[in-house]
Amino acid sequence: MAVYVDSGRWKFRGMIMCHMLADTEIELHAMAALIGCKREWYQWHASTPHYDLPLFRRQEAIKAGAIEIDRKQTVALIRRIRTGQARFFAVSDEGLKIENSLSVD
């Protein structure tokens, strides 16, 4: 299980941005909290759940243990997540449960 930051570089509101993805939603949110991202920045509605990070937060994520990945590795990771090979979790009133909503039928 791991958290990843891609090598993407695009401009948004005067900042250079990249993506932060993870094998599990728990890891993704834990890293986001650790590096100071707001939960509202979570891109859950996207085809692959992620956070958009400005470069200074990318550096913080790497210092905290995130793995740098290139474009080819990013595509492979996204495929793994979308095909359900990476597990995403949700916390409900009943506790922790696996939610594999990203699997392809």
Image (cartoon, rainbow, N blue to C red):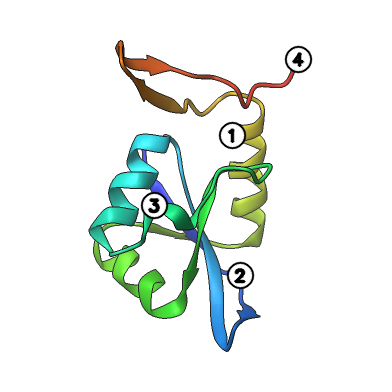
Q: In this image, 31 relative to 69: left or right? A: left
The local crowd at label 4, few if under 14, some if 14 to 19, many if 20 or more residues have their Cα within 10 Å, is few
In which quadrant of the rendered view does residue 18 lie?
bottom right
x%, y% of residue 10?
65, 77
Which mark is first along the chain, 2 or 4?
2
Which mark is first along the chain, 1 or 2?
2
Which mark is first along the chain, 3 or 4?
3
**Labels 1 & 3 near each other (Cβ < 8 A):** no
How much space separates mark 1 and mark 4, taking CA atoms? 14 Å
| Mark number displayed over residue 39 | 3
The amino acid marked with disc number 1 is Ile
User: 91 and 67: which one is in front?
Assistant: 91
In which quadrant of the rendered view does residue 82 lie?
top right
How much space separates mark 2 and mark 1, taking CA atoms? 18 Å
The amino acid marked with disc number 4 is Asp
Which mark is first along the chain, 3 or 1?
3
x%, y% of residue 22?
45, 44
Q: Quadrant of the C terminus?
A: top right
**Labels 2 & 1 near each other (Cβ < 8 A):** no
Q: In this image, 11 relative to 51: left or right? A: right
Q: Quadrant of the N terminus?
A: top left
Q: In this image, 101 relative to 31: left or right? A: right
Numbered disc 3: secondary structure: helix
Which residue extends farthest right? 105
Quickly name the residue at label 1: 81
**Labels 4 & 3 near each other (Cβ < 8 A):** no
How much space separates mark 4 and mark 2, taking CA atoms? 29 Å
Which residue extends farthest front? 93
**Labels 1 & 4 near each other (Cβ < 8 A):** no
Label 3 or label 2, whichever lies nearer to me, is: 3
Quickly name the residue at label 4: 105
